Amino acid sequence: MMDTKDWKVTEAPTCPHCKAEMEQMDSRHLDWDSPYLWVCYNNECTLFKKGWKHMMEGYGQLVSYRFMIHPQNGDAGVIPAFSHDYLARYGKPGNPYADE
Ligand SMILES: [Zn+2]
């Protein structure tokens, strides 16, 4: 387990876009310097829904993004929701310590 006492956000935050409780996403394989990120997985999230529309109209691509918060510094941002393969592997709630 990592020492998380200096982390800004270690309790599930609430998404400012849809008020859903955010969930941990395993990000050990990603470039975020953190074993997990807080991600809003609500498919009704206004940011997520707007993203699909925006990307489809603007780029003709079926991708979107989800709202996320970095647990260590509390920075808010978005994380792309790419392909179905990617989502099936990493884009769902998961325990970042599962296979340690
Ligand atoms: Zn949301």
Image (tube, helix red, strand yellow):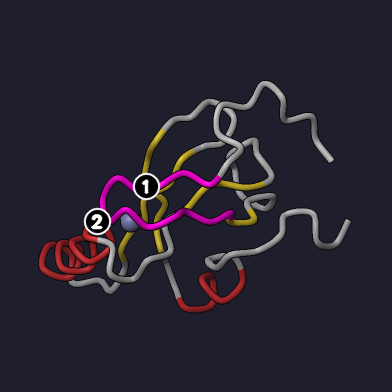
Q: Which mark is residue 47?
A: 2
Does the magenta portion include 18? yes
User: Does the numbered disc 2 mark a residue whose Cβ is under 8 Å from ligand 1?
Assistant: yes
Instruction: Locate ligand 1 by image quadrant.
Output: bottom left
Q: Is residue 20 left or right of residue 52?
A: right
Please tell me which residue lies in front, 56 or 96: 96
For the N terminus, the image quarter is top right
Looking at the rendering, which quadrant does residue 66 occupy?
A: bottom left
- Residue 12 screen position, x and y as percent: 53, 47
Above or below — where is 22 with respect to 58? above
Q: Residue lying furthest top in this view?
A: 6
Q: Is residue 54 left or right of residue 10?
A: left
- Residue 10 screen position, x and y as percent: 61, 37
Above or below — where is 90 with respect to 9? below
Which residue appears at 58% of the width and 54% of the height? 24
Compare marks 1 and 2 and give the one earlier in the sequence.
Answer: 2
The reply to whether the C-beta atoms of the residues labelled 1 and 2 are less than 8 Å apart is yes
Q: Which residue is mark 1?
A: 78
Range of residues picked out in magenta: 12-24
Q: Amino acid at mark 2?
A: Leu
The secondary element bearing badge 2 is classed as: helix
Q: Is residue 31 left or right of residue 15?
A: right
For the C terminus, the image quarter is bottom right
